[in-house]
Amino acid sequence: MRITEIPGNNSGGLVKILAIPETSFVSLGYASGSVRSLNLTDLDNIICIECLPTDAGFQEKKTETDAGDSYDIEISGVIYGKSPSNDAIINDLRSGTWRVAHQDANGNFVASGCNKVRMVFESKVDTGQNRSSRKGTVFSFSCKDRLPSINIASIQ
């Protein structure tokens, strides 16, 4: 009998989202055996969005049809506050399609949009309605892919 594991640390949420432009993606290869590695170049063009785990998440839903399997993938989060620097990053994100890697609160990395499909960025500014509200740009990267996202052991 095979039994699923219950990890000791199983915190939800994401802490880091990397938006990777086509020019920075080299390959998704094998580091050793079946361990996957994301190989990148030109790191200055990669956008790193840091998040609180309570404000960012990853969802992937598998759908089976006569045409084959597909996966609806969504990575969502918040870019906090409003500043000229954040506005410039948001404008860059709106102008392209992306391969995306994210790190969860347990340190695990996953890559999405690495097949023939790229992820699309959508956003909405939200000021909140009271002092304790989260203020910033709520965003998501999404796509429909025929392959699931891939767990990766390292980013090089």
Image (cartoon, grey):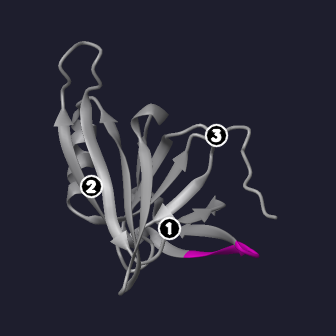
58 is within the stretch colored magenta: no
Name the quarter where the C terminus is drawn.
bottom right
Residue 24, compared with residue 116, is above or below; it is above
Q: Position of residue 81 (x, y in %)?
A: 27, 29
The residue labelled by disc 2 is 93
Which segment did they paint magenta? 28-34
How crowded pointer 2 is (Cα within 10 Å; few <14, some 14-19, many 20+) is rated as many
Q: CA distance from mark 2 to mark 3?
A: 30 Å
Q: Residue at x 64, y 60 (%)?
A: 154
Q: What amino acid is found at the position of numbered circle 2 in the picture? A: Leu
> Which is closer to the viewer, label 1 or label 2?
2
Q: What amino acid is found at the position of numbered circle 3 in the picture? A: Asn
Q: Answer with left or right where residue 151 lies relative to residue 41.
A: right
The residue labelled by disc 1 is 41
Q: Nearer the viewer, residue 41 or 112?
A: 112
Q: CA distance from mark 3 to mark 1?
A: 31 Å
Quarter where residue 137 is shown: top left
How crowded pointer 3 is (Cα within 10 Å; few <14, some 14-19, many 20+) is rated as few
N-terminal of the two: label 3 or label 1?
A: 3
Residue 124, compared with residue 72, is above or below; it is above
The residue labelled by disc 3 is 10
Assign the magenta stretch its main secondary structure.
Answer: strand
Q: Do the residues under discs 3 and 1 have CB atoms within 8 angstroms?
A: no
> Which is closer to the viewer, label 3 or label 1?
3
Q: Which element carries disc 3, helix, strand or loop?
A: loop
Q: Which element carries disc 2, helix, strand or loop?
A: helix
Q: What amino acid is found at the position of numbered circle 1 in the picture? A: Thr
Q: Residue at x 39, y 62 (%)?
A: 73
Outermost right residue: 1
N-terminal of the two: label 1 or label 2?
A: 1
